[in-house]
Each structure stands twice: as C-alpha cells, then as structure tokens.
Image: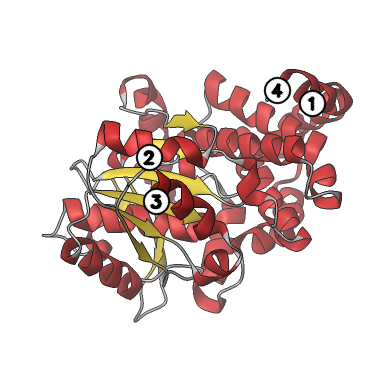
C-alpha cells in the first residue's frame, strides 16, 4: 500500500472513532416473531410492502411462513424472488422498478445477507433516484431516508439486519463494493428462530463462522469502543456456547435463537468498528467467483490471524478466555433464562 494512502486511511479511521459518540447510529427495533410484522407495518408505513427473497428460501417454505401471517392480517404485499448470492446492480434495478410499479410503501428483506443487502440497495435507489448504486459506493453517500425496511434473517451470520452497509456486485465488472450510510440501518429486525429451523448443517456452520469473523475482526481492530468490544464478546460467547448444538440439532430453537442474537450483536459491533483483511479478501473472492461469504471467511480467518502474529495475541487471548470460561455457563443461561 502507498505510504501516504496508508496514513490517510489511519487518519480517517481515527477521525471516525473520535466521532462515534455524535454519529447517528441507531439499533433496529427487535421483533421476536414474524407474527409481529403486520402490526409494525401498519404502525410505520401503511400500504403495500415488497418482500425481497431468493428462490432457495422460497422453496424452503420460508416465504410461505411470512405471507401466511400477512394474509391473515389483511396486509397487501408484492414478492420479488430473483435476488441472488452477491446481489448485482441489475437485480437491484429490476426490484426497484417492481417496487415503483406496484406502489409499495415499505420493504422486507427475507433471507440471508444477500436478500437484506438487496433490499437496502433498493431502498437507497428509491431514496436517491438521481444516483446510481456505484455513485453511492463508500461512506455517507445516500444521505436521504429510505422506505421503512424490515430485515428478517433466515441465517445466523451476516448481521446485515443490524448494519448500515449493503454489499453489491457490479453486473458488468463483477467488482464488489459496499454502500455505507445510516439510513440503511433497518427500521426493525425480526429474530425468529423458526425461520432458521431448516437451515442445512453446512450453512449453519458457515454462517456461524461469518458471525464469529465479524466479532473477532471488530474486537481486534483499532477503531473499537467499550460498547463495540462488549457486543463482540457477547457474540463470541454465544457462538461458542451454541454453534455446535445448532449444528447437531437444528430443531433446538433455543440454540438457534442464541445464534441469531450472536449474529445481531456481531453486526452491531462491526458496524461501528469495521472489519479487516479477512473480509477484504473474502469479498473479493465472492465478487469474482461467487464463493459463499461465510465459507470464505471460515477458510481465511485462521490464515489472516496467523499473519497478524503478535499484534493481536493479547486481544485474541481475551476473546478466547471469555469464550472458554463462559461456554458452559452461558449455554445454561440461554436455556433457562431466555436470550443473553
């Protein structure tokens, strides 16, 4: 890296860290079940909503679980089921046109990070019809309130339901970039473990590793605060206490719920503390080769941590101690006293 650019990046990170207390970060309202979605829509944005989902989630019956609730409540909806892993600019534009044509008033991102990121990007284009997505790449380039956005994760990993970022792939160049701005933080996040019940073991593992990577990179970075470190520790503890149980028994709803909360806390943490080289490389691989993001993180995490060498030993020791000491205790607490 060019030395001048390196110092510019460090100065920028320092400035953002100092500004954290006055920046308009907010947390989504947490909803425990999809049954609460119609009431929230009536409260925040009455009218037709658009559900953004991929065909895999639809085939797994997850869309039907949501639409059944909407139908019973008399809530009108439109479904866009063409989003893909690593959502592209072309997909976002197609969804935006449908949103406008159907006269929608709100957005629901149902699925993994791809569906939620696609919904955020659609919201950004609705708010800023004067800007293409590429022009909003970077930080604080949306600048206007997007439609009411409800994020419903069906995996416990991406944390997109808590963050101000949407990761998009340019359809022509395959370049993958992030749009980061406060209006992209969802209005509400639905952490319903029933939606993760059918998640295959392989995805339970890789999405869980995605959440762990978020927490680890947020904790060891240079732009942390007491709050972001606390969120990261909470996420790591929950993951170590529950990921194996969720993997072995997908019907264990308490383990699934704990993993959803872990992903949420990890998302809160890295949203304010950034991620690092693991994600930098993983996003590049994903954009070029369509590699699942959680899998890329899982493979890269030990390699990058080893390359960091002694610069992260102290912080990794703190995380490891917290995880090992708390695993048995926290696992029992999750089951006996609810989440956290």
Q: Are marks 1 and 3 in contact (CB under 8 Å)?
A: no
Residue 226 lies, with reference to residue 182, above or below; the image says above
Mark 2 or mark 3, which is nearer the start of the sequence?
2
Location of mark 4 (residue): 338
Instruction: Depth check: give the residue in front, 75 or 251.
Output: 75
Mark 1 or mark 2, which is nearer the start of the sequence?
2
Mark 3 Cα shell of 10 Å, populated few (<14), some (14-19), many (≥20) = few
Mark 2 or mark 4, which is nearer the start of the sequence?
2
Q: Give the number of the disc on residue 71.
A: 3
Location of mark 1 (residue): 335
Location of mark 2 (residue): 38
Residue 110 lies, with reference to residue 59, above or below; the image says above
Please name the residue shown 53% across and 37% down the image: 33
Residue 226 is situated, as x and y percent measured from the top left of the image, at 56, 19
Instruction: Depth check: give the residue in front, 224 or 158.
Output: 158
Q: Is residue 145 left or right of residue 181?
A: left
Q: What is the spatial separation of the Cα atoms under label 1 and label 3, in whole angstroms? A: 33 Å
Residue 267 lies, with reference to residue 227, above or below; the image says below
Mark 1 Cα shell of 10 Å, populated few (<14), some (14-19), many (≥20) = some
Please name the residue shown 18% across and 50% down the image: 127
Please name the residue shown 26% across and 63% down the image: 133
Residue 249 is situated, as x and y percent measured from the top left of the image, at 84, 49
Q: What is the spatial separation of the Cα atoms under label 3 and label 4, in whole angstroms? A: 30 Å
Q: Secondary structure at mark 4?
A: loop
Residue 266 sits in quarter: top right
Q: Secondary structure at mark 1?
A: helix
Q: Is residue 264 visible?
A: yes
Q: Secondary structure at mark 3?
A: helix
For the view shown, which residue lies furthest in the left direction?
130
Q: Quadrant of the C terminus?
A: top right
Mark 3 or mark 1, which is nearer the start of the sequence?
3
């Amino acid at each position: 890296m060019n030395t001048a650019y390196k110092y510019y990046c460090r100065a920028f990170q320092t400035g953002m860290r100092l500004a954290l207390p006055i920046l308009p970060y907010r947390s989504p309202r947490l909803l425990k079940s999809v049954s609460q979605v119609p009431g929230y829509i009536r409260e925040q944005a009455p009218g037709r909503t658009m559900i953004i989902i991929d065909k895999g989630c639809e085939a797994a019956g997850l869309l039907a679980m949501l639409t059944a609730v909407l139908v019973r409540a008399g809530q009108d909806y439109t479904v866009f089921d063409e989003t893909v892993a690593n959502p592209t600019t072309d997909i976002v534009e197609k969804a935006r046109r449908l949103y406008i044509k159907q006269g929608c008033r709100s957005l629901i991102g149902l699925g993994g990070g791809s569906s939620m990121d696609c919904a955020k990007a659609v919201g950004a284009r609705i708010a800023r019809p004067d800007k293409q997505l590429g022009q909003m790449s970077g930080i604080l380039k949306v600048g206007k309130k997007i439609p009411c956005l409800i994020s419903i994760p069906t995996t416990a990993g991406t944390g997109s339901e808590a963050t101000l970022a949407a990761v998009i792939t340019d359809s022509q160049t395959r370049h993958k970039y992030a749009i980061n701005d406060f209006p992209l933080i969802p209005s509400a996040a639905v952490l319903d473990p029933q939606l993760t019940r059918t998640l295959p073991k392989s995805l339970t593992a890789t999405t869980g590793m995605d959440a762990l990577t978020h927490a680890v990179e947020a904790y060891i970075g240079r732009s942390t605060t007491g709050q972001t470190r606390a969120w990261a520790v909470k996420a790591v503890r929950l993951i170590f206490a529950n990921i194996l149980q969720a993997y072995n028994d997908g019907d264990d709803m308490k383990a699934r719920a704990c993993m959803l909360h872990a992903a949420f806390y990890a998302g809160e943490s890295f949203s304010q503390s950034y991620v690092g080289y693991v994600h930098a490389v993983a996003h590049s691989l994903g954009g070029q080769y369509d590699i699942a993001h959680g899998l890329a993180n899982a493979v890269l995490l030990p390699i990058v941590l080893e390359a960091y060498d002694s610069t992260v030993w102290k912080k990794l020791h703190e995380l490891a101690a917290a995880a090992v000491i708390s695993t048995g205790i926290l696992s029992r607490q999750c089951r006996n006293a609810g989440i956290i």
